[in-house]
Amino acid sequence: MRVMASYETRTRRFSRAEYERLIDLGVFQPGEPIELIGGELMVAEPQGVAHYTAIVKTAKALEAAFGPGWHARTLGPIGLDDDSEPEPDIAIVPGSPEDYSRAHPSRPVLTIEVAESSLAVDRHHKGSLYARAGLPDYWILNLVDRVLEVYREPAADSAAPFGWRYARHEEFDASAGVTPLAAPGSSIPVSRLLP
Amino acid sequence: MKAERPVLHRWTRHEYARLIDESFLDEDEPIELLDGLLLMKEPQTSPHRTAVLLVEKAVERAFGEGWFVQTQSPITLGDRSEPEPDVCVVRGSPRDYVDAHPTRPALVVEVAQSGLRLARGRKAAAYARARIADYWIVNLVDRVLEVHREPARPGPARRHWGYAAIEMLDADAMITPLAAPSAAIRVADFLP
């Protein structure tokens, strides 16, 4: 019997329940930028000045566009699936913050990552994870090229890290306007999102 | 700098100890801390287990008095590594290490089948960085003993810590541990 020599090194994976217990136990330092992505503990991108400014501007612009009955969570955990609890830069969810005092929201209608050094990971890794969870509207505010990347229509793709990707991809530059799927009557100038 | 792959959280030995103290991780869970990563260990097949027992016996005889052999037990290498090598030879007696795991074994041996890449890669890097002078891999795939010596730091020639002198010995060859210069063990004695 011959056994294959090529064995992928695997790290210990964590479920979301285990991850939440780790947080309760205080194993991590408070504010340590960690997210649970597909069972792996991932270190988030450090917040630069432009990155943080973009988060604040985008959250404000989206709350204005969505109006009452919605709110923008910034850097808040999302209970995405059994082995993922990401903290997207911005997530638009129905209701008010008090509605989520017992459990994190799981299905934002719009999820946004602001990307500088994390561009590749946000596109391939997180894009695949969010598509697998069926998140309908995923935007990457790309600070490197100063464009907004809009991803929609989750579709199965065995080559993607989590088996799914977004079938549609559009790019909007600073002069364009963008309309969220869940706020069809609005149009947000991309320039109001960029730092 | 652009990260193409997600950057994984690196655990410290202190955090790892807390996971065990809080019974978050079972002591018997097949993982080890290597360079901050909690790695799953190679599954214990029967040939693997047999080789571990054979190596244990052979090196115990070769080193003799003043040393002891521990199998699949932790050693401490710096702040972010607490591996559990299949076999390692430590100076003194077990009671010398009641308060802390051994840190400088004279010989480390890993038995590798499906985990060959890990043994040659991340593990070799961690052992070289800890200046383990004598690191052997009982390679069950090719039935050879790989002898790794001369820890070498990263530089123009290598991206990571590693060993500058690597020798492959087949079953008929003899091997002498660096720390037991008068001993000679036949490689065949290690092979299941």
Image (cartoon, coloured by chain):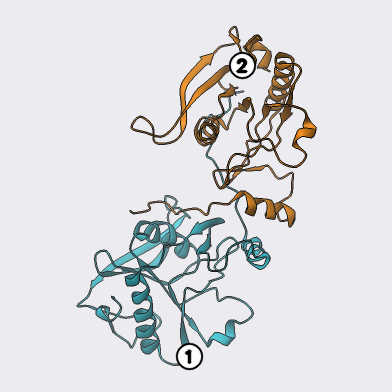
Residue B123 position within the rendered picture, expressed as x and y whole percent measured from the top left: 55, 34
Which residue is at a point 48% across and 76% down the rendered structure image? A108
Colour that chain A carries in the picture: cyan
Residue annotated with mark 1: A69
Nearer the observer, B46 or B146: B146
Corner quadrant of residue A131: bottom left
Q: Residue furthest top?
A: B172
Q: Are marks 1 and 2 in contact (CB under 8 Å)?
A: no
Residue plotted at (28% across, 81% down) = A192
Q: Amino acid at mark 2?
A: Pro
In the rendered image, the quadrant that contains the C terminus of chain B is top right
Whether residue A90 appears in this view of the structure is yes
Taking the image as shown, residue B106 lies to the left or right of residue B7, namely right
The answer to whether residue A180 is visible is no
Q: To which chain does the residue with label 1 belong?
A: A
Q: Please name the amino acid that badge 1 sits on.
A: Gly
Q: Secondary structure at mark 1?
A: loop
Q: Is residue B183 above or below residue A105?
A: above
> What residue is at 76 percent from the left and 33 percent from the top?
B96
| Local crowd size for mark 2, using a 10 Å CA cut-off: few (<14), some (14–19), many (≥20) | many
- Residue position marked by numbered label 2 in the rendering: B177
Q: State the residue at coordinates (47%, 30%).
A: B162
Residue B152 percent location from the top left of the image: 45, 29
Q: State which mark lies toward you, 1 or 2.
A: 2
Reply above or below: B27 against B48: below
Quadrant of the image occupied by residue A141:
bottom left
Colour chosen for chain B: orange
Q: Return the x and y of residue A109 as percentages of the image width and height.
A: 45, 77
The number of discs equals 2
Q: Neighbour class for label 1 at 10 Å: few (<14), some, many (≥20)?
A: few
Where is residue B56 shown, x and y percent of the image?
Answer: 72, 22
- Measured Cα–Cα span from mark 1 to mark 2: 73 Å
